[in-house]
Amino acid sequence: MSDSAAGTLPEERSGSLLRKVAWHWRYDEKRELWIGWWTLVVFYNLYGLLFFVITRTQPPPQPSLSPAEIAQWFADRHHGLLYGYAIVSIVGGATAVMNATLAYSMRRMSVSRAFAYSYLVIYALATLPGMLIMGVVCSVGAMRPDRDPALMSWLYDFAFLSFEGTMGVFLIGSLVWMAAVLLDENRVFPKWFGYLNLCNALTEVVVAPAWIFQDGVFAWDGEIAWWINMGVFVTYTTVFLTLLRRLILREDFGTGPLPELSQ
Amino acid sequence: MTTAAKAQHRFVPGQPDMWAFVLFEALVFTAYFVVYVVCRTRSLDLFLQSQAHLDLRVGVFHTLVLLASSWFVARCVQAARERSFRAALTNAYLTMLFGFVFLVSKVLEWAAKLDEGFGFTTDEFFSFYYFLTAIHFLHLLIGFVALGIAVHQLWSPARRSQELVETCATYWHTIDFLWVLIFALLYVMR
């Protein structure tokens, strides 16, 4: 039997951050949930750093670049793409822990387990086109800069259309989460978060024209298909990370309504 | 606090959570509208020429139909507050009917425009026309789910949550509000 179960849980150590972390690692019964939550926070920050700063694949470049410009685009990012996506391939597996944490929120609700399972499967699928395929294809382009520009164009289109292709997955994932939140009677999340999921789902639909347009606001780099959508997604992500943190703080490992945090 | 006292203390009709949705959707659509206006300013002649191919009378008809549906959903809420559930159900069905008329009429308008050779990729104005009307159409389809929930609540004495009925009505009014703005931008603004 653990110390916690025996009722002899030692007091949380005061002192250095390291001591606090060590205490939580050893005694905190919510340890796995906090690991999952911190994985989410670290991963999303790392994702931003890798995609926006190191590989510079986001914000996305214009779809209408000529083959010569595309070859130059790969040449300009040669090291960033190779090093960046090497890191992506190492940390990509963290999505399993992240998805498990998100699915946990649905398992804690009063709704059917089918919601959590659907969410797990659909987001496991999203990792492939949205991150790994795009990473591999961009790395293939960067690896041999002397390749025929026509082939570089092919890789460029493949990489960015693969990335765009995850939007339908996020659409369904958001709707699953929305339905779970609105049907839940355990008050795991506020109802407005359910409606925010609907907002996010609807902006994912708006990405679909990116498959048709190579220029303008509906192209994959356009104001509507990318910028507004990204603004909503960042807001949505910030909100659900905050609410997940509150869920972990409120978690009592029961099956009924979650208690509110004391003031 | 009793249910009646809670009702008196409410700041808005229905769940306040739905109003968060209204606010967020208003912000997202405002962003779409700003992009539209910027593009329109850049290519004013093209937008005016293409806009001339839309029939203002059809736009007015759509607006009146949706305003009527909003009026019926408001009457539905009022009847439910007065515990006249039969009248509330009738008004909910009339809301659905007018929503359906809008949907059919919008599909007919799209079909007519496609027949005339104006598609999604014809020019920038028609890209916006199809985009804004289609995303609104999608919101309206979800509105039918909301009305279905309201009818489900009104149907049985065992349910009849006034808060849910008002929440669904709020969603429906939002669709109407968004349409009025889309109508003004696409059909009226010269």
Image (tube, coloured by chain):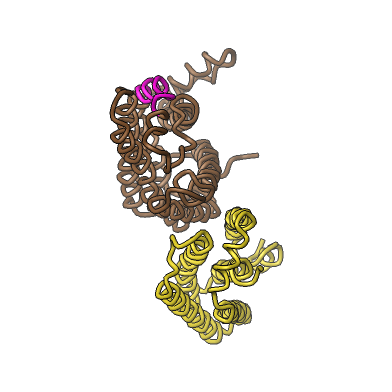
> Who's the residue at 42% across and 48% down the image?
A214
A75 inside magenta stretch: yes
Question: Which residue is more in the foreground, B155 or A78?
Answer: A78
Chain colored yellow: B
**Residue A36: x %, y % from top left:** 42, 31
Observer able to see residue B115: yes
**Which image quadrant: the N terminus of chain B?**
bottom right
- Vertical placement of residue B107 versus A64, above or below: below
A67 inside magenta stretch: no
**Residue A96: x %, y % from top left:** 34, 34
What segment is highlighted magenta in the picture? Answer: A74-87
Chain A drawing hue? brown
> Who's the residue at 29% across and 27% down the image?
A147
**Residue B172: x %, y % from top left:** 55, 70
- Vertical placement of residue A175 versus A28, above or below: below
Judge left or right: residue A82 versus residue B134.
Answer: left
Judge left or right: residue B34 versus residue A77.
Answer: right
